[in-house]
Amino acid sequence: MAFLLIKQQIIRHKLLQLLHPRRMWHKVKPKASNTSIDLKTVPGNKILVAYFSRTGDNYAVGNISKGNTHIVADAIAKDLGAKTFEIKTVKQYPANYRETTQVAQQERSSNARPEMATKVDNMQDYDVIFLGYPIWWSDMPMVIYTLWKAMILRVKQLFHFVLLPVMC
Ligand SMILES: Cc1cc2nc3c(=O)[nH]c(=O)nc-3n(C[C@H](O)[C@H](O)[C@H](O)COP(=O)(O)O)c2cc1C
């Protein structure tokens, strides 16, 4: 139980950091490359905030017209003067939460690559991409697998931001 509480606190802390982008984004040191990028020096038109987010019936919050990831994506974009890009799938997910979980589970077990209805134009023009998505079945939604490798190959820095429910 104590472990769970500590874990929740850590997650809550991370989420609060996400909701206060100015505190966190300006100096980010990615582990893999061991280099840092000062986002204050990157012009807003070189940063893209791409996100996948659902509206409709959502976990713990009921029916929403703007998804959680969408809200955070807008906050990051506003803070950095960046553009946003909404990742949409050709096949839309049901508005009903439980039905969506079933579709998503099926996609995950078949290792699907859902087709995208939207496309990032001139991805190579961006130096930094923030890629946001909710956790679905302890994983990325499968549409993120459809596009994220292309992003890694084309931009200098790719940061993921991830949304999941936090019970406080
Ligand atoms: C299909 C589906 C699967 C989910 N799986 C998980 C999960 O494995 N763990 C978890 O903590 N939350 C899970 N959630 C909850 C979402 O991560 C959470 O509601 C998130 O904030 C939704 O973001 P959005 O409003 O941007 O779509 C799931 C939600 C959906 C719709």
Image (cartoon, helix red, strand yellow):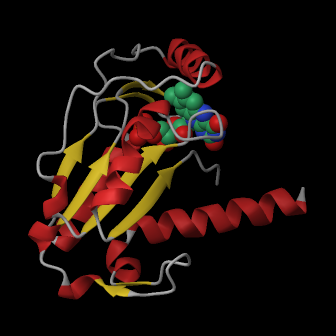
Q: Give the residue at x 23% y 25%.
A: 117
Relative placement, left or right, of 167 versus 71 is right
Q: Reply above or below: 48 against 145.
A: below
Q: Is residue 142 left or right of residue 111?
A: left
Residue at 41 percent across and 49 percent down: it is 149
| Residue at figure coordinates x 38%, y 72% from the top left | 20
Place residue 54 in its image quadrant: top left
**Residue at image x 56%, y 78%?**
31
Percent position (x, y) of residue 23? 38, 82
Which residue sits furthest right? 1
Task: Check the image and name the residue furthest to the front.
Answer: 153
Displayed-image quarter of ligand 1: top right
Image spot of residue 157 (x, y percent): 35, 70
Between 122 and 27, the residue placed more toward the observer is 122
User: Is 40 rendered above or below residue 112?
Assistant: below
Residue 158 as seen in the image, left or right of residue 98: left
